[in-house]
Image (spheres, rainbow, N blue to C red):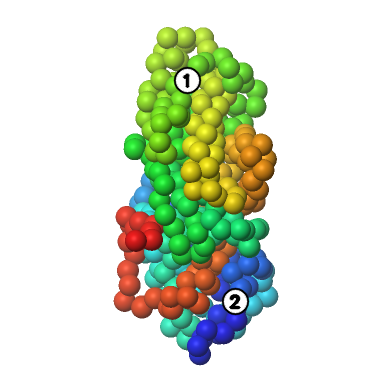
């Protein structure tokens, strides 16, 4: 694809917003030629959560090799690329800066345009990698460690915010409950694993705001888990995990389907790390099928942080909005750009 004088078919994406060091090569925003993710789980596990200073240092150590791997797996040399896209926010400032600086340096060395990508928009593009042409609008439930958003996506770059969490993000609730139960880090996969052996009806945890509006609240659920376990110290962790997970899934699915109905959506999508959760994926697919709507679920690898979604969003952005200036910095609290 050519945009003006810019050849931008093949984009190198770089993602370093939190604790995954990732690079990917994607053609035309659609064909993933390589996607390398180096997880820092081992670095942070001992602390029960991401330590920002350690995350930044680990990105510095890992990124050059991760980029080299992504290029060699794709069989592409740097100067053959059309652009380099990197996440500029939201995220941890020390982590973001590592990816942004590397991307700009590569652009200067290889004479390529730089594209600064919004991480949240990257998560929205992840579903499009597997389902490039959904009928618009679709409702996307974006559930990650830092965000819980319901978005009406009317096309790439065209977003309306329908609802968001009033307190904790869904992934944050998984991580906090896992830490409380001593199940380890990251919490989401640990809870999902324990829940497979548990009884989801063992505890009747609250479903906050399930039948009211499109906003979410998860901090009361976390407190309810703590209280329940203190009241029943002999309770099995597996039952607590299963009951907690069920409460989160019930609320997320009910709100997503209500949003789809209110906006006459032609499909429902998931994005963000929590979207890798098997019971959430199954429940949303079932609820969507019951209403005759397609559920556009990205592969699990594309739900958690990766650079293919950044390259895909960067490819679209370059084609429609142009390159980002090399004087642009990282923005830790960057928001999703919304329609007026
Ligand atoms: O999108 P992501 O990789 O990073 C952020 O942008 O935050 O999301 C990470 C979050 C963490 O809270 C993690 O516990 C959660 O996604 N997560 C899961 C699962 N895998 C990751 N939550 C529930 N079930 C999972 N299988
Ligand atoms: Zn993310």
**Discs 2/1, front:** 1
Q: Position of residue 152 (x, y in %)?
A: 47, 52
**Badge 2: residue crowd in 10 Å (few <14, some 14–19, many ≥20):** many
On the image, the x and y values in percent for residue 3 come to 52, 84
Residue 170's spot in the image, x, y percent? 45, 38
User: Height in image: 5 above or below 280?
Assistant: below
Residue 321 rendering spot, x and y as whole percentages = 43, 75
Q: Is residue 47 above or below residue 243?
A: below
Question: Residue at image x 51%, y 9%?
Answer: 234
Q: Which residue does the image show at 53% across and 30% down from the upper left?
A: 250
Picture layout, residue 180 above or below residue 68: above
Q: Which residue is mark 1?
A: 205
Quadrant in which residue 59 is drawn: bottom left
Find residue 85 and name its label.
none
For the residue pair 285 and 33, the one nearer the viewer reads as: 285
Q: Which residue is label 2 attached to?
A: 10
Q: SS for tag 2? A: strand
Q: Is residue 262 visible?
A: yes
Q: Quadrant of the N terminus?
A: bottom right
In the depicted view, which residue is nearer to us: 130 or 184? 130
**Which type of secondary structure does the marked residue at label 1 adopt?**
loop
């Amino acid at each position: 694809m050519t945009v003006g004088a810019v050849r931008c078919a093949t984009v190198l994406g770089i993602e370093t917003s939190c604790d995954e060091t990732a690079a990917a090569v994607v053609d035309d925003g659609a064909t993933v030629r390589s996607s390398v993710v180096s997880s820092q789980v081992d670095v942070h596990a001992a602390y029960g959560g991401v330590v920002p200073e350690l995350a930044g240092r680990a990105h510095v150590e890992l990124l050059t090799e991760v980029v080299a791997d992504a290029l060699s797996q794709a069989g592409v040399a740097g100067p053959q690329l059309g652009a380099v896209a990197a996440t500029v926010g939201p995220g941890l400032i020390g982590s973001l800066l590592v990816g942004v600086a590397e991307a700009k340096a590569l652009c200067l060395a290889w004479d390529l345009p730089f594209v600064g990508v919004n991480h949240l928009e990257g998560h929205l593009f992840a579903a499009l990698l597997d389902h490039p042409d959904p009928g618009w609008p679709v409702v996307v439930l974006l559930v990650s460690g830092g965000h819980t958003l319901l978005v009406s996506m009317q096309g790439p770059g065209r977003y309306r915010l329908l609802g968001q969490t009033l307190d904790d993000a869904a992934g944050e609730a998984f991580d906090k409950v896992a830490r409380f139960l001593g199940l380890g880090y990251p919490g989401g996969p640990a809870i999902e694993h324990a829940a497979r052996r548990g009884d989801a009806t063992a505890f009747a945890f609250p479903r906050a705001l399930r039948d009211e509006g499109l906003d979410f609240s998860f901090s009361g659920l976390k407190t309810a888990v703590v209280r329940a376990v203190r009241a029943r110290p002999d309770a099995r962790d597996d039952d607590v995990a299963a009951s907690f997970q069920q409460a989160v899934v019930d609320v997320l699915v009910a709100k997503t389907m209500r949003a789809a109905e209110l906006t006459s959506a032609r499909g429902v999508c998931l994005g963000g790390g929590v979207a890798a959760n098997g019971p959430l994926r199954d429940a949303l697919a079932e609820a969507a099928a019951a209403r005759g709507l397609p559920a556009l679920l990205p592969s699990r690898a594309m739900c958690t942080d990766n650079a293919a979604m950044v390259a895909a969003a960067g490819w679209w952005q370059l084609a429609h909005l142009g390159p980002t200036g090399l004087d642009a910095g990282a923005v830790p609290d960057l928001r999703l750009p919304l329609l007026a």
